[in-house]
Amino acid sequence: MLDDTLKAQLQAYLERLQQPIELVAALDGSSASLEMRELLETIAALSNKIALRTDGQDARVPSFTVQGQGQPGQLRFAAVPLGHEFTSLVLALLWAGGHPPKVEAGLIEQIKALPGDYRFEIYMSLSCHNCPDVVQALSLLALLNPRVQTVVIDGALFQQEVNERDVLAVPSVYLNGAAFGSGRMSVEEVLAKLDAGALVKQAQQLDALEPFDVLNIGGGPAGAAAAVYAARKGIRTGLLAERMGGQLNDTLAIENYPSQLHTEGPKLAAALEAHVRHYEVQIMNLQRAVRLLPAAQPGGLIGIELASGAVLKARSVVLSTGARWRNMNVPGEREYQNKGVAYCPHCDGPLFKGKRTAVIGGGNSGVEAAIDLAGIVQHVTLLEFAAELRADAVLQAKLRSLPNVTVITQAQTTEVLGDGARVNGLRYTNRATGSAHDLALEGIFVQIGLVPNTEWLKGALALSPHGEIVIDARGHTSVPGVFAAGDCTTVPYKQIVIAAGEGAKAALSAFDYLIRTPQPQQVVGEAVPQV
């Protein structure tokens, strides 16, 4: 199950255990139980600080707990945590064994001080690259606070339970039996949902910050590169992000980034964040900008109002807010999101095993999604608006070789159909004939491109008809002191390497602006200009 190289790496990690731990398994004679037993026996054999018991009892079989010796099992895996979740298992072993987590001390204290009792159930899939962050966040809560229980459930292993709860997207989290959240969540995001008082305090702290020389809005490749280049100039630099890494966190394989033959989005996102943290950059994660407040006079302070009500001030701003998946904007889509309408085939595909699905979009992303799904689901119908697919020829050839894939071109999706609880069909119009058709299916994967995250900037600066921030060759926007970079701008070709380069260029332009623009004398108590 684990090759010799992986065993050696795991054994090296387990040498960091500071106290004994137990793995307590509830097993039966199923193949999944045999696989779980083999994994646990392999792990226990690698460290004399790990004891394995197979006399556990639980409603979910197979499953096992990770716990300090003699302590209650607050963390349970109803899964054989390999694939993307193997790292989650390794971290759980280390944390249960007393190895300190790489989390800020303030967050650890916040976890330990949580009021009330919490029982989390998280449904995940082993192929989901968004799931580990949530699994690790909730595992940490359970191992640090005795009033928190966390159960990690492989949706593919407990398919009947998934069907009964209508779980059609992962990660999906339940708290004390009620839906808590879905999608990628960090430990900070989980705590923000549990502890509202901490948000108020955080907003007050942000509002009191001294002005930045350069404030970068966005934590993806463009924002990270801009922050690094600005900080290396020795000026006061801030980075505000809704989530560090941006859309990289939703990207699986990356094979076109120079110097990297192959990497994964979350791994590159983590590397970018580590690079930014290497410099004196004040990172303000999980914060959403809602308004740009231009300077009252040339060279004056620019304001960025946050959703929390706090206002950050800076002499210059770099906007790198990126883009997000484009919606179809048809009846039923919003109603059935996470109830059959999905946007990540790698994450949610296993939940549709043996079912009928559709992919909307015939570009590279859409065709790759259809190929991926074809190995899992009963049938895939790919619908493309244009007369021909737009994907690379090699991908089209692979797609058309698959026996359980149907391709329909000139198809305009007009409605997502459902029974009120989940998707049961899709309606489209044949653009050549004008005739309407219904497809019976259980899942729809939308892959039709991106839309820039710039709605909050309407009226504050110039945007293109597509909502992109209009910039010149140096990254200048229509507002003095405000620059922009990456997928949210009019720069063609939305690629990671281009976004990173544009971020660096915008930061250099901001620095050039700062050294060439005199700063007006600030009046004590001067208010941030309003628009």
Image (tube, rainbow, N blue to C red):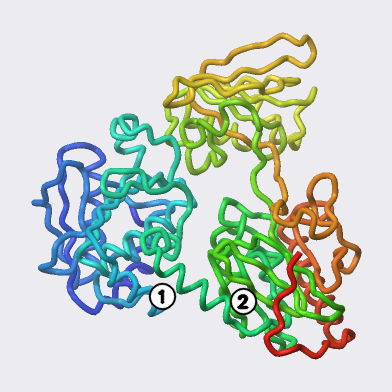
Q: SS class of the residue under badge 1?
A: loop
Measure how far apart labels 2 and 1 are at the Cα level.
16 Å
Q: In the figure, is residue 37 to the left or right of 413? A: left
Whether pointer 2 and pointer 1 mark residues with C-beta atoms closer than 8 Å, the reply is no
Question: How crowded is the residue under tag 1: few (<14 C-alpha within 10 Å), some, or many (20+)?
Answer: few
Height in image: 189 above or below 419? below
Q: Which residue is mark 2?
A: 276
Height in image: 340 above or below 279? above
Mark 2 or mark 1: whose residue is earlier in sequence: 1
Q: Quadrant of residue 354?
A: top left
At horizontal 71% and vertical 83% (from top left) the residue drawn is 526
Residue 47 drawn at (x, y percent): 23, 70
Residue 489 drawn at (x, y percent): 80, 56
Q: Please state which of residues 488 and 87 is positioned toward the viewer in this rendering.
A: 488
Q: Please state which of residues 60 and 3 is positioned toward the viewer in this rendering.
A: 60
Pick the quarter of the image with the C terminus. bottom right
Amino acid at pointer 2: Val
Height in image: 298 above or below 67? below
Amino acid at pointer 1: Lys
Q: Please state which of residues 461 and 246 is positioned toward the viewer in this rendering.
A: 461
Residue 375 drawn at (x, y percent): 50, 31
Q: Which mark is residue 245?
A: none
Q: Which residue is mark 1?
A: 102
Is residue 232 among what the camera can see? Answer: yes
At horizontal 13% and vertical 69% (from top left) the residue drawn is 69
Q: In the figure, is residue 206 to the left or right of 360? A: left
